[in-house]
């Protein structure tokens, strides 16, 4: 064989090999991911390593696979500034268990094909610009444990098929435009108002808002005893006519009596209401009138009843005190319970500006923020009305509970850290204008009956403190939680909130207050004490001894996040969105259902 013929044969073999490796190597899931990528706007080229020439997508950014068959197991692409839409091709990834695309700029609708991913456990699509409704067949995702569609522009009715998701432990549909009655069916009946907050047109038992029904009477049609139509005789016709006239006369008389009775009751009720309201108004000074503002219809009670209850609050109703005033427990006539904060501080400026800024705070709805329901100005004081959270504050659980009382295990502490981060990230990144809390601390993290955290007192530091006052650095925060640069300059930023949140993480790990006497004697705060012990390799001394179920892997991860949050240089601290992303990756990956105490075999 001649040399040129041998070269030609080798060239053909090499080209064929190259062609097969380029065009046949990538798995079917990999090709599907490339279709999904083509529908996305990756302006920062963060998905640049998604290449058709690869054999497998398992090392691509944000992708993980099952080890035994290399099928795609999770897509984790939050905070990537991705635009575009979610491709219907997603439905071909039938082994997908986790889809996290939250905090991006996605638009369009949630594709119905996503319900073909029947092994899906966690679906995170919050904080995008998604429109349309929830796919009607979402009930096909029988293993779904976590569903977070909050902070989008979704609308329409909530499908009843959600009730079939018996493994669902976390549901967040808040801050959308859903409307109609929430189905009280199956799993949906287990979730309360916090899962639906911020959808003003929703009604139903879960949000304590009755749905409106028509006022008409039902029509009852007569029917014959057989299929044949009965033909009345002339005699029976006269008889039926008399009966009909008598029945109509009786009904007319009964209607007159009923209307008279209702009129008397209405007048009596009106007189009682006027009398009660007059009694309240008698206490009002001529120059300073009582004023009640409820935000977005969040207080389904007559104004006179609310004012009467507020006026009657006394020392027996006190449940605590904070940096801005005393907190009372107010119980309405139907046993509805609210927390009332009496404001002990004032600020310069008109009441109109103050009330307008309060209304902005009242419009903020999030599952991990305490709901501000209203404001009342009485002659001698100003009062804020909030949701009442029965379990008290994180500070109570960590530092005030005695022997025999409920303790926080490690899973509960992680849940509190994650929820608190979500609430604070919402204030920093999703509110317009953004809100800097200025007083993040354990006593401002309130817990509901499920130990879900709710950040309280957001916005009050700025609202109630004169910006020109020299004492701003003292009154707008709590010693031990304040960032060094905030103490020096008195200027609060998002990064000073991040520092306070880092201290909160250390408080959760150690079970100690930021200014605990055990290390204050050494001239340290909790940050310095933690750094000293870690340098001495004494990690076991950092962990709260009451937290027996803490595992070292997640403890080290939380301490690393806390260290980044409490960096002395504010520019080197992460944003709250980044902190939230780190917590979600460390706490809820790779098996989110374990975090919500579901069955481990779901992952």
Image (cartoon, helix red, strand yellow):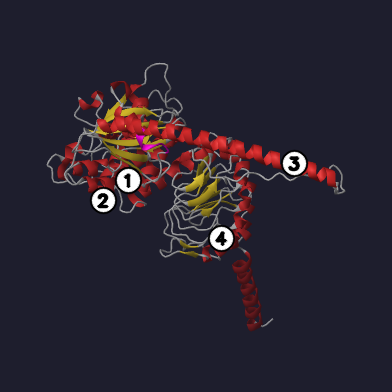
Judge left or right: residue 329 versus residue 243. left
For the record, the magenta segment spans: 300-304
Which badge, 4 or 2, comes first in the chain's sequence? 4
Residue 111: percent from left, percent from top: 58, 58
* Residue 139 seen in this snapshot: yes
Based on the picture, tell me whether residue 60 belongs to the magenta stretch: no
Which badge, 2 or 3, comes first in the chain's sequence? 3
Quadrant of the drawing holding the C terminus: top right
Q: Residue furthest left?
A: 470
Tell me the mark number nearer the camera, choosing from 1 and 2.
1
Neighbor class of circle 1 (other Cα within 10 Å; few <14, some 14-19, many 20+) is many
Residue shown at 24% from the left, 33% from the top: 284
What residue is shown with label 3?
Answer: 242
Tell me the mark number nearer the camera, choosing from 4 and 3.
3
- Residue 284's place in the image compared with 157, above or below, is above
Residue 322: percent from left, percent from top: 27, 31
What residue is shown with label 1?
Answer: 361
């Amino acid at each position: 064989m001649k040399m040129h013929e041998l070269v030609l044969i080798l060239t053909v073999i090499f080209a064929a090999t190259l062609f097969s490796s380029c065009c046949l190597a990538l798995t079917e899931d990999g090709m599907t991911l490339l279709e999904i990528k083509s529908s996305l706007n990756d302006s920062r080229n963060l998905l640049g390593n998604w290449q058709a020439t690869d054999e497998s997508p398992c090392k691509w950014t944000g992708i993980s696979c099952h080890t035994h068959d290399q099928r795609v197991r999770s897509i984790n692409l939050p905070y990537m500034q991705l635009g575009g839409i979610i491709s219907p091709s997603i439905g071909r990834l039938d082994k997908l268990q986790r889809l996290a695309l939250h905090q991006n700029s996605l638009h369009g609708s949630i594709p119905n094909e996503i319900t073909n991913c029947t092994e899906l456990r966690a679906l995170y699509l919050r904080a995008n610009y998604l429109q349309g409704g929830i796919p009607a067949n979402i009930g096909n995702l029988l293993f779904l444990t976590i569903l977070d569609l909050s902070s989008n522009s979704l609308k329409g009715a909530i499908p009843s098929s959600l009730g079939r998701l018996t493994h669902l432990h976390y549901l967040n549909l808040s801050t959308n435009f859903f409307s109609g009655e929430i189905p009280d069916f199956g799993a949906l009946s287990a979730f309360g108002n916090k899962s639906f907050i911020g959808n003003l047109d929703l009604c139903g038992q879960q949000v304590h808002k009755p749905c409106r029904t028509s006022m008409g009477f039902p029509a009852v049609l007569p029917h014959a005893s057989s299929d044949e139509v009965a033909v009345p005789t002339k005699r029976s016709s006269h008889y039926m006519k008399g009966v009909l006239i008598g029945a109509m006369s009786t009904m007319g008389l009964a209607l007159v009596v009923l209307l008279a009775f209702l009129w008397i009751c209405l007048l009596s009720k009106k007189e009682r209401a006027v009398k009660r309201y007059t009694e309240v108004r008698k206490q009002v000074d001529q120059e300073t009138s009582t004023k009640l503002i409820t935000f977005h219809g969040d207080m389904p009670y007559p104004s006179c009843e609310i004012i009467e209850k507020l006026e009657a609050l006394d020392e027996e109703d006190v449940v605590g005190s904070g940096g801005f005033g005393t907190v009372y427990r107010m119980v309405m006539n139907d046993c509805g319970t609210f927390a009332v904060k009496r404001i002990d501080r004032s600020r310069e400026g008109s009441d109109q500006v103050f009330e307008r800024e309060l209304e902005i705070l009242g419009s903020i709805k999030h599952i991990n923020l305490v709901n501000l329901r209203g404001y009342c100005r009485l002659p001698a004081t100003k009062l804020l009305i909030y949701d009442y959270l029965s379990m008290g504050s994180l500070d109570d659980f960590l530092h005030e509970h005695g022997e025999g009382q409920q303790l926080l295990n490690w899973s509960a502490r992680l849940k509190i850290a994650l929820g608190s981060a979500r609430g604070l990230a919402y204030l920093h990144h999703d509110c317009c204008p953004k809100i800097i809390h200025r007083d993040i601390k354990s006593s401002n993290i309130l817990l509901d009956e499920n130990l879900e955290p709710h950040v309280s007192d957001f916005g009050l530091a700025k609202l109630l403190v004169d910006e020109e006052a020299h004492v701003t650095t003292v009154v707008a925060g709590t010693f031990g939680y304040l960032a060094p640069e905030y103490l020096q300059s008195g200027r609060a930023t998002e990064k000073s909130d991040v520092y306070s949140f880092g201290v909160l993480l250390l408080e959760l790990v150690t079970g100690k207050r930021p200014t605990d006497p055990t290390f204050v004697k050494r001239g340290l705060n909790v940050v310095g004490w933690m750094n000293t012990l870690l340098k001495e390799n004494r990690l076991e001394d950092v962990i709260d001894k009451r937290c027996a179920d803490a595992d070292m892997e997640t403890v080290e991860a939380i301490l690393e996040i806390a260290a980044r949050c409490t960096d002395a240089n504010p520019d080197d601290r992460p944003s709250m969105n980044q902190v939230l992303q780190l917590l979600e990756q460390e706490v809820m990956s790779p098996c989110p259902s374990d975090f919500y105490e579901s069955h481990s075999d779901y992952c």
